[in-house]
Amino acid sequence: MSGLNQIIAAFFGALGFAFLFNLHGKEIFYTSLGGCLAWCVYLSAGLIIPQYGKQYFAAALFLGIYAEFFAVRTKVPATLYLAVGMIPLIPGAALFMMMQNAFKADWEQFAQYRLEAFITGASIASGTIVAAVCWNIFKNYWFNKK
């Protein structure tokens, strides 16, 4: 699948979950855009660093900062932006292949996909945490200057 098709699919995948979470108005577009842009960062990071863990970290870091920024601008909790924006980043293929190999009792392939799913999940979580910490440091520094 080409990069443009993946980006479009990421937007509409996130858009579906925005509707599922019963969002309204501008929130639908901005949350879906966050997922789309996070996938763009993932693909762009892949051109520079071809390691999926670091790609997911970069995408989650971007999405975390995006969520915090738009939460302040739109006065909506950042969790909405994170929940919808994370949809394209979910390691669905690794999880599917892990379970398929578990049912086939191919334990070597199961372990490989289990590690991939774990690294992806840990990268997403750590990218989100680093973004929240960086945002809090920035916010405290920027708004507490006298």
Image (tube, rainbow, N blue to C red):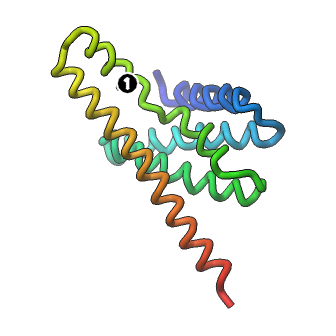
- Compared across the picture, whether 66 is left or right of 61 comes to right
Q: Please state if 49 lies on the left or on the right of 128 as rendered.
A: left
- The amino acid on which the numbered mark 1 sits, given as a three-letter code, is Leu
Q: Which residue is mark 1?
A: 95
The residue positioned 67% from the left and 44% from the top of the image is 80
Side (left or right) of 42 relative to 29: left
In percent of width and height, residue 73 lies at: 75, 58
Name the foreground residue: 103 vs 36.
103
- At a point 66% along the width and 37% down the height, the residue shown is 32
Instruction: Name the residue furthest right.
Output: 25
- Please tell me how many numbered marks the rendered image carries: 1
Q: What residue is rendered at 32% in x and 40% in y?
A: 119
Percent x, y of residue 58: 44, 50
Q: Position of residue 140 (x, y in %)?
A: 60, 76
Residue 75 quadrant: bottom right
Asked if residue 36 lies left or right of residue 51, the reply is right
